[in-house]
Image (cartoon, grey):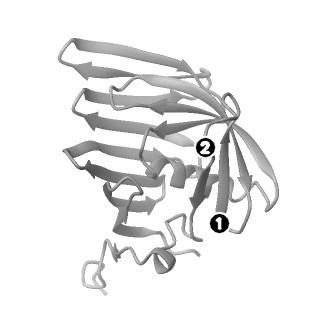
Amino acid sequence: MTKPVRRAGRLALADGGIVLWSLAEGRNGRRWRWNRVGPTGLVEAGLLEIATGGSFARLELATPSGLLTIHPEAGEGRAHGNVVSDQGVTPIRVAWTADHDIGVAGSPVPRLAVAHALRGGVGVGETSARTTVTVDARLALAERRETWTRIGDGRWVVRDTDDPARAEQIVTVDAEGLPPWIESSEPSWALETSADRGS
């Protein structure tokens, strides 16, 4: 039986930002928590839940603009939730299928989750067509069509189908669905020690 992944770490971004994250895997799937800090301070704090089969289950996001929660409803073909801001509460309701993913503009965490989820069904050299609903810093949602092509064991290239001129993204994960820490020299730590587990 594979040991559940329970780790935390830090990831430096190309724009100078820093992401602190944790990932806890259990019977109901995976739960990511993270915050992202930029030159002017905290950009966002988020919680992302992924079901055992790899599908998106829930996103909670806090930015200076407010608070967002969104989750799909089984059998409805919709995802819904709300945004809380200083203007009040705004309901969210968007179409949702098995080919939909959630994204957060500027954050690598949802991309890592998608790469890990696709790993079991997309072989090297194969491509999966996806629709990504991305949340921006203002907590507005935008839907874009993308392709995920697996170019290595844990390496993917993501292309925007709606805007081919947009720069492609490279997403890399290790066998556990985490960034390749040995290559990047970024630190990561176990969430639990043997003493915490009582062993």
Depth order, front residue of 82/15: 15
Q: Are marks 1 and 2 in contact (CB under 8 Å)?
A: no
Relative to 143, residue 9 above or below: below
Residue 28, image x and y in percent? 48, 52
Is residue 80 visible from the viewing direction of this image?
A: no
The answer to whether one can see residue 125 in this image is: yes
Question: Of callouts 1 and 2, which one flags the residue occurring earlier in the amino acid sequence?
Answer: 1
Vertical side of 190 occupied by 178: above or below: above
Measured as percent of width and height from the top left, residue 165 is found at 66, 35
Q: Residue furthest right?
A: 125
Q: Is residue 137 left or right of residue 181?
A: left
Q: Residue at x 31, y 22 (%)?
A: 83
Determine the CA span between mark 1 and mark 2: 20 Å
Q: Quadrant of the C terminus?
A: bottom left
Q: Looking at the image, which residue is at 45% across and 60% down?
A: 26
How packed is label 2: few (under 14 Cα within 10 Å), some, or many (20 or more)?
A: few
Q: Say which element carries label 2.
A: loop
* Residue appearing at x 44%, y 46% in the figure: 49
Residue, disc 1: 154
Label 2 amino acid? Ala
Residue 19's image quarter? bottom left
User: Which residue type does callout 1 highlight?
Assistant: Gly
Q: Position of residue 134 (x, y in %)?
A: 49, 32
Q: What residue lies at 32% left-to-right and 52% top-to-bottom?
A: 34
Q: Is residue 13 left or right of residue 66?
A: right
Which mark is drawn over residue 167? 2
Residue 78, quarter of picture = top right
Instruction: Answer with left or right where residue 123 lies relative to residue 60.
Output: right
Q: Quadrant of residue 175?
A: bottom right
Is 160 situated left or right of 102 in this image? Answer: right
Label 1 vs label 2, nearer the camera: 2
